[in-house]
Image (tube, helix red, strand yellow):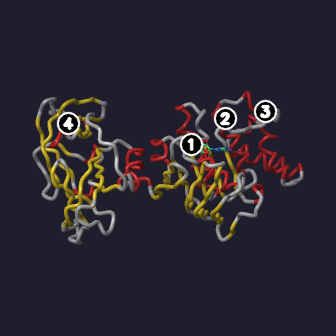
Amino acid sequence: MIRVIAEGLVKRYGPLAAVDHASLELPPGELTCLLGPPGAGKSTLARLLAGLESLDDGEIYFGERMVHGIAPGDRGVGMVFQDHALWPALAVRDNVGYPLKLQGIASRERRRRVEEILTTLRIDSLADSRPDALSPAQSLRVALARAIVTQPDVLILDEPLAGVEPRHRDEAWDEIRRLRAELGLTTLFLTSNVAEALAHSERLAVMDLGRILQSGEPQELYNQPIDVFVARLLGPTNLLQGQVDGNGNGNGNGGEPRREVVVRTPVGRLVARANFPGLSPATPVTISIRPETLTLGPAVPIDSNRFPATIERIVFHGGSREILLRGPGDWPVTAVAPQCHSANVREGQTVTLSVAPEHVTLLMGKFAVAGGH
Ligand SMILES: Nc1ncnc2c1ncn2[C@@H]1O[C@H](COP(=O)(O)OP(=O)(O)OP(=O)(O)O)[C@@H](O)[C@H]1O
């Protein structure tokens, strides 16, 4: 299993930097999702790793090997494209065998390896079918077979589920996870689907405007987003602008000192988790509070932040209720509560909202202040 390290990658198309000093590490044998909106530069970054585009700057290592001078076919990368890019005139077995042919593998050995991989992916019955006779889910399996038949170290999947029906997507993810684990493939999965990236990645990297903004475990990015873009991309959140007032001095559960900072905001002073060092008083900051971390009700834990708010609207979602409130300073704030814990809330009611300091996250970057829900 190999580690992939990309450092300061740059790819320009005329004046546009499609990849703009992007750095990314793929841990050996793990599945990393590269998440970003259309046009973020994901495909270009993937093509740089695979050697399908030339670098303008930066370095790429596969393990100890710097791969710049190595041709795409010799890098040990298998790739699946968004449209799967199967050759329409070739039967499934010939599509899958083609990369082996390019490597000069003799036809008998080729046949053996193709049959083996078709069986692994449970598509041996489709060996003589043409691509236009396949369902999107079958086509994906064929594209996966073709990508791994050469036994690559790295598998890159560029939005491969785009055409797959929702009811077959979980199955496709299971297949990808199984292959990755069995073959020890260092895997990069490109997607613009936030829910899938959070659910299926072992590591998550967020990309926008050619840059990697943050990477880490999915929970880490969701709970401690670095900036407003990452916070909003990964899920609904309440944003507030404020100014650093001073350092808090709370203690964690084990009695160890907690790094906290007090922020002056339009809803009053809030104690936040200090995830940046050296925040001096009067520094402007943005705060993010996820709706599900807010608690409604009179029982407020001792160290929690609290403020009054009036319920304007309640939206029932089945398992949970989304509660739209108006806080001090006319702040539009949204809370989400499980159905069983919110049966008694009513529109028009004034309640106490509370949130623990570890769920009050400081972000880099500002946001445009919006007036309503
Ligand atoms: N060959 C090219 N020539 C010129 N511009 C390009 C080329 N390839 C990509 N771009 C531009 O580079 C930017 C990044 O494109 P890229 O396809 O890498 O993004 P992406 O995140 O993969 O988006 P999508 O999900 O839409 O494929 C876009 O603005 C795109 O128009």
Q: CA distance from mark 4 to mark 2?
A: 47 Å
- Apparent side of residue 316 relative to residue 202 in the rendered image (left or right): left
Front one among 13 and 217:
13
Q: Which residue is mark 3?
A: 88
- The image's mark for residue 325 is 4
- How far apart marks 1 and 2 lie (CA) works out to 28 Å
Say which residue appears at 58% left-offset and 48% top-offset.
Answer: 42
**Nearer the N terminus, badge 1 or badge 3?**
1
Given the image, on which type of amino acid does mark 2 rest? Gln
Q: Amino acid at mark 1?
A: Gly
On the image, which quarter does residue 55 sit in?
bottom right
Q: Is mark 4 within 8 Å of ligand 1?
A: no
Q: Residue furthest top?
A: 133
| Residues at discs 2 and 3 in contact (Cβ within 8 Å) | no
| Residue at numbered disc 2 | 138
Q: Earlier in the sequence, mark 1 or mark 2?
A: 1
Q: Position of residue 100 (x, y in %)?
A: 82, 51
Q: Amino acid at mark 3?
A: Pro
Q: Is residue 298 visible?
A: yes
Q: Quadrant of the C terminus?
A: top left
Give the label, 2 or 3, closer to the camera: 3
Residue 108, image x, y percentages? 88, 50
Inter-mark Cα distance, 1 to 3: 28 Å
Question: What residue is pinned by disc 1?
Answer: 39
Q: Are marks 1 and 4 in contact (CB under 8 Å)?
A: no
Of marks 4 and 2, the one in the foreground: 4
